Every structure is written in structure tokens, then in C-alpha cells.
Amino acid sequence: MWLVFAAASALFAGLTSIFAKCGIRRTDSTIATAIRTIVVLIFAWVMVFIKGSQGGIYNLSGTTWLFLFLSGMATGASWLCYFKALQMGDINKVVPIDKSSTVLTILLAALLLGEPLSLSGIAAVILIGAGTLLMIEHKNAAAHAEGSAWLVYAVLSAVFAALTAIFGKIGIENVESNLGTAIRTVVVLVMAWLMVAVEGKTSRLRFVPKGELFYIIISGFATGASWLCYYRALQDGLAGVVVAVDKLSIVVSIAFAYFVFGERLSAKAAAGLVLIVAGTLVLALPAMGL
């Protein structure tokens, strides 16, 4: 069942990128992140009360609180970097780099969580890593011409995303997944709005175009759905496999980028995408008993 949740997480995460890109054409990415986090927070706590798990907050250990907090901080940092990169670069540039966090997560899960790294796991790391490099290389030449600041933000997004998965896995071992998601979203919300205040962008809130505000809100709902599915899957499944399946959102993102924004892949980038999908299937199929 956790694989179903991981697949649903990938679908909603892919939609998040598309909706967010539509919402940050003129709106500052930090402001957009802060606004959409409000939506995610409401979404998360509604699910907590529907599940009736709010009482579990009184039974959380200090260790659980610590890692939920760290996971929230890592998520906030990843979000801020990701949407900044997405605002500056094409979806087909940013998403592959962000999804390279899969490789780092698998390695960290083996090193820090003791999750087994089989021959198939090693093969998956090679396939996903090679595929990501092919997709990144395709866009690097253009990046030098138009500025590479987006690349720095995209790489940081991937690093923080990997740390999010590791901290999240530890933090939700003894807590209901919806409650864990809601708690860590509070941390993300505080972090996002602090960044808005620190950067002196509060006054810009009233200038957010209504059309973009709509897409920002919709992206928040998509993110909330993705998170709830993701952490439900992470609670029962292996972190390395869950993250890999979740990263298949790259297929959704690129498909929509093609139809919505007219962004196209070269033959080399398409080959990289095939390798990423193949590496993911190498991880996921054994978990499904296939």
C-alpha cells in the first residue's frame, strides 16, 4: 500500500511544479512560498483532525520533536531554494537537478539509517545519477549564457531535500504520519515568513496578481496532498525506495512543461529521463514483489 501512496505523492509533486511556475512569473518566489505554506498547513491540520490523531502530540518524545523540527527546517530551505530556481530557470532545467536528491538520499539512508544497499540498489543509484547528469548537461551550455544562479539554488534544493527525507524518516517513526506532517509544516511556515520579513518583502504582498495568487494556492493544495501521501509512504516503506518513486514526479513535470510551456527535451535529455525512470523501477519492482 505504501507504494500507492508514494506514486500519488509523485503525481501531486509534479503538478506542484507546474502550478507554482504559473504563480511566480511576476510574484517573488519567497512570498509565493510563504503564501502556499499557509495552504499546506491548513490542509495538513484538517487531515490530522479527520484522522483524530491530534491527541498524539502530547506523547511525542524529545527526539521526535527534534527531528520533526530539523525536517521542517530542511524542507523550508529546500522549498525556498527550489522555487527561487524555478523562477529563474526552466522547469526542464531545475527539476532534474532537484530530483538528483534521490541518489544522496539512498546513500544517506544506507549510511545513517542502516537501510540495505543491494546490488540492485547500487545499479539504481548509477542509473539515476547518470540520467540526472545527462539532463543537467543538456542545459548547462545555455546556463552560462543566461546566468547560472538558478543552478546554485537547484543544487541546494536537492541537498536539503535529501536531508528532509532522512530527518523525516527518523522523526515519524513513533508518530502518526499526518500529525508529523502537520507539525513540521508549522516549522516551514515560520521559516518562510521570517524570510519574507528579513528580506523586507512584506509590503509586496498586496501587489500579488490575482491570477498568480490562484495558482500559488492551487500549488499549495497539490503540495499538501503530495506531502500527506509521501510521509504516509515513508512511515511504512524504505526511505530510499519511497524517495525514488516520489521523484518520478519528474515525468509529470516534464510532460506538463511540454504541453503547458512548450519546453522540449533533446534526445540526450530524453535518454537521461529514461535512465532515471529505469533506476526508479529497479528499486521499486523488488519492493512490489516483482
Image (tube, rainbow, N blue to C red):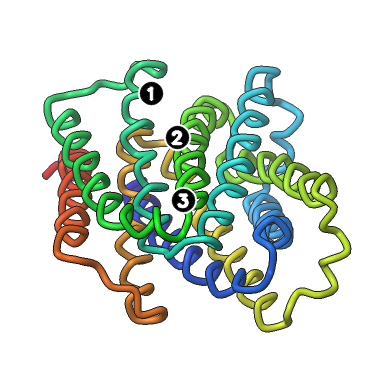
Q: Residue at x 52, y 25 (%)?
A: 170
In this figure, which residue is indicated by the disc labeled 2? 162
Looking at the image, do the residues carrying marks 1 and 2 touch, with CB atoms under 8 Å apart? yes
Where on the picture, by quarter, is residue 141?
Answer: bottom left
The quadrant of the rendering that contains the C terminus is top left
In this figure, which residue is indicated by the disc labeled 1? 108
As helix, strand or loop, the secondary structure at mark 3 comes to loop
| Measured Cα–Cα span from mark 3 to mark 1 | 28 Å
In the visual, does 158 lie left or right of 81?
left
As helix, strand or loop, the secondary structure at mark 2 comes to helix
| Residue 284 rendering spot, x and y as whole percentages | 22, 44
Where on the picture, by quarter, is residue 270?
Answer: bottom left
As helix, strand or loop, the secondary structure at mark 1 comes to helix
Q: Specify the label residue 148 is tagged with.
A: 3
Relative to residue 18, is residue 132 depicted above or below? above
Q: Earlier in the sequence, mark 2 or mark 3?
A: 3
Q: Residue at x 53, y 33 (%)?
A: 168
Q: Badge 1: how crowded within 10 Å, few (<14), some, or many (20+)? A: some
Q: Residue furthest right?
A: 203
Looking at the image, do the residues carrying marks 3 and 1 touch, with CB atoms under 8 Å apart? no
Q: Residue at x 57, y 67 (%)?
A: 219
Closer to us: 218 or 176: 218
Q: Earlier in the sequence, mark 3 or mark 1?
A: 1
Q: Nearer the viewer, mark 2 or mark 3?
A: 3
Q: Earlier in the sequence, mark 1 or mark 2?
A: 1
Q: Residue at x 69, y 75 (%)?
A: 213
